[in-house]
Image (cartoon, rainbow, N blue to C red):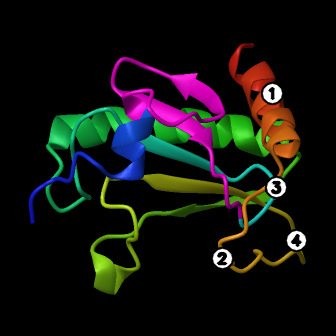
Amino acid sequence: MPYDDNNIFAKILRGEIPCQKVYETDDALAFMDIMPRGEGHVLVIPKAKVRNILDVDADVLSDLIKTVQTVSKAAKQAFGADGLTIQQFNESAGGQVVFHLHFHILPRWEGVPLKPHTGEMEKPEILSANAEKLRRVLDQ
């Protein structure tokens, strides 16, 4: 299937839809998930037009995973997490909903389950505060 230039992440990259940006490189963007499954849930996407891991160029993926690692370390520190869950879905049958390659970074704490994906959006002030926590660590 071809890449859809109208997916929500493409619109975010073009500045058509706002996001709570936490980190950016020439090749990747990290921002808060507006429907988080836990405190500090952040997404990392490539700036390249890529549907998923099945069609990404290896060099793009290499650069992207470095950003995933950088943001993951910062998220663990910023939120005092015990660990992290990194999720990445491919095609509808694999759970992919937005067809632009993305990684979910979810800080985790012992005994605290992930919230279900309800489609409920987080309050903007909470997203902003969580983004600021991450940016403070990333700016060190």
Q: In the picture provided, is 117 more to the left or to the right than 101?
A: right
Q: Which residues are magenta?
A: 13-36
Q: Position of residue 68 (x, y in %)?
A: 50, 41
For residue 39, which numbered disc appears in the image?
3
> Which quadrant, please, contains the C terminus?
top right
Compare marks 2 and 4 and give the one earlier in the sequence: 4
Q: Is residue 65 visible?
A: no
The Cα atoms of the two marked residues, 1 and 4, are separated by 24 Å
52 left or right of 66?
Answer: left
Mark 1 crowdedness (10 Å alpha carbons): few <14, some 14-19, many ≥20: some
Q: How many residues crowd mark 2 within 10 Å: few (<14), some (14–19), many (20+)? A: few
Q: Which mark is residue 132?
A: 1
> What number is the disc on residue 110?
4
| Residue lying at the far bottom of the rendered structure | 93
Residue pushed farthest front? 16
Residue 126 placement (x, y as % from top left): 87, 44
Percent of width and height locating residue 8: 41, 50
| Residue 30: quarter of image | top right
| Residue 83 image label | none
Residue 45 drawn above or below residue 29: below
Residue type pointed to by label 1 = Glu
In the displayed structure, would residue 57 be above or below residue 121?
above
Of marks 2 and 4, the one in the foreground: 2
Q: Which residue is mark 2?
A: 117
The residue nearer to you, when weighing 41 against 64, is 41
Among the two numbered marks 1 and 3 on one chain, the one whose residue lies closer to the N terminus: 3
Question: In the image, residue 121 lies at what x, y percent?
Answer: 72, 60
| Res. 77 visible in picture | yes
